[in-house]
């Protein structure tokens, strides 16, 4: 009787192993960032202010790699410019890709997020969230579209918050 139970558990374990081993593993996309938005990045703030900000100094044509994580999560590898945009210029060379963690690979839309918090001498603090958003239901689609947004919340010393969001849209074609 015990042998039959263990044999049954072994068969179930093998089936679970096979079913979880399948699915999304990796996709590589040639990305085309919206050139007009890159050269004058649009923004909107929760206090009603809106307009265009400074250009993002990054190529409009990029290659992004999306991989499966260890627990049905995902990761995206993008140009190092985006690390500098979020964290400022660090010891890490700009040529080194920036890797962000993402949502589940099971279904879309998909988001990859990183954040940075700073304290500014005598004027308050701020938090910046950078998000890569991909529309759709599959990370293995022939074509993708979405946007990159950078949302900054500044808290002044009198505790007044202002949140502004900058964004650039993109499209992509799968190459691997």
Image: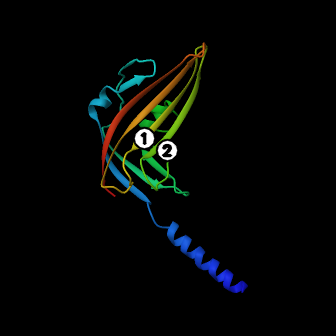
Q: Name the residue under label 1.
A: 132
Sort mark 1 into few (<14), some (14-19) or many (20+) by Cα contacts within 10 Å.
many
Note whether 51 is above or below 99 in the view shown. above
Outermost front residue: 1
Q: Distance between the residues labelled 1 and 2?
A: 9 Å
Identify the residue shown where x is 49% and y is 44%. Answer: 100
Q: Quadrant of the C terminus?
A: bottom left
Q: Residues within 10 Å of mark 2 (few under 14, many from 20)?
A: many
The residue at the far right in this view is 2
Q: Is residue 111 left or right of residue 168?
A: right
Sequence order check: which comes first, mark 1 or mark 2?
Answer: 2
C-beta proximity under 8 Å, tags 1 and 2:
yes
As displayed, is residue 122 above or below residue 57? above
* 1 vs 2, front mark: 1
Q: Is residue 142 above or below residue 12?
A: above
Picture coordinates of residue 17 (x, y %)?
Answer: 55, 71
Q: In this view, does 14 lie to the left or right of 75?
A: right
Q: Is residue 69 visible?
A: yes
Please name whichever residue, 7 or 61, is drawn nearer the observer in this view of the structure: 7
Horizontal and vertical percent for residue 15?
54, 74
Q: In this view, does 3 lie to the left or right of 159?
A: right
| Position of residue 10 measured from the top left corner of the image (x, y, whole percent) | 62, 78
Q: Image point 72% across, 87% down: which residue?
A: 1
- Give the residue at x 49% y 26%: 152
- Colouring mode (rainbow / by chain / secondary structure / one colour): rainbow
Q: Nearer the viewer, residue 11 or 36?
A: 11
Q: Is residue 58 visible?
A: no
The residue located at (45%, 18%) in the rendering is 47
Q: Mark 2 points at which residue?
A: 100
Image quarter of residue 13: bottom right
Q: Is mark 2 on a helix, strand or loop?
A: strand
């Amino acid at each position: 009787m015990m042998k039959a139970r263990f044999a049954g558990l072994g068969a179930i374990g093998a089936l679970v192993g096979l079913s979880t081993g399948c699915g999304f593993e990796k996709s590589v996309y040639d990305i085309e960032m919206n050139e007009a938005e890159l050269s004058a990045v649009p923004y909107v703030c929760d206090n009603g202010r809106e307009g265009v900000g400074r250009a993002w100094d990054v190529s409009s044509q990029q290659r992004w790699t999306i991989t499966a994580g260890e627990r049905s999560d995902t990761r995206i590898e993008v140009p190092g410019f985006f690390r500098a945009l979020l964290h400022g210029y660090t010891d890490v060379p700009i040529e080194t890709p920036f890797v962000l963690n993402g949502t589940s690979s099971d279904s879309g839309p998909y988001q990859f997020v990183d954040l940075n918090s700073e304290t500014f001498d005598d004027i308050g603090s701020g938090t910046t969230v950078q998000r890569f958003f991909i529309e759709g239901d599959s990370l293995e689609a022939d074509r993708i579209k979405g946007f990159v947004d950078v949302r900054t919340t500044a808290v002044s010393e009198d505790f007044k918050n202002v949140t502004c969001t900058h964004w650039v849209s993109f499209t992509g074609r799968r190459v691997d």
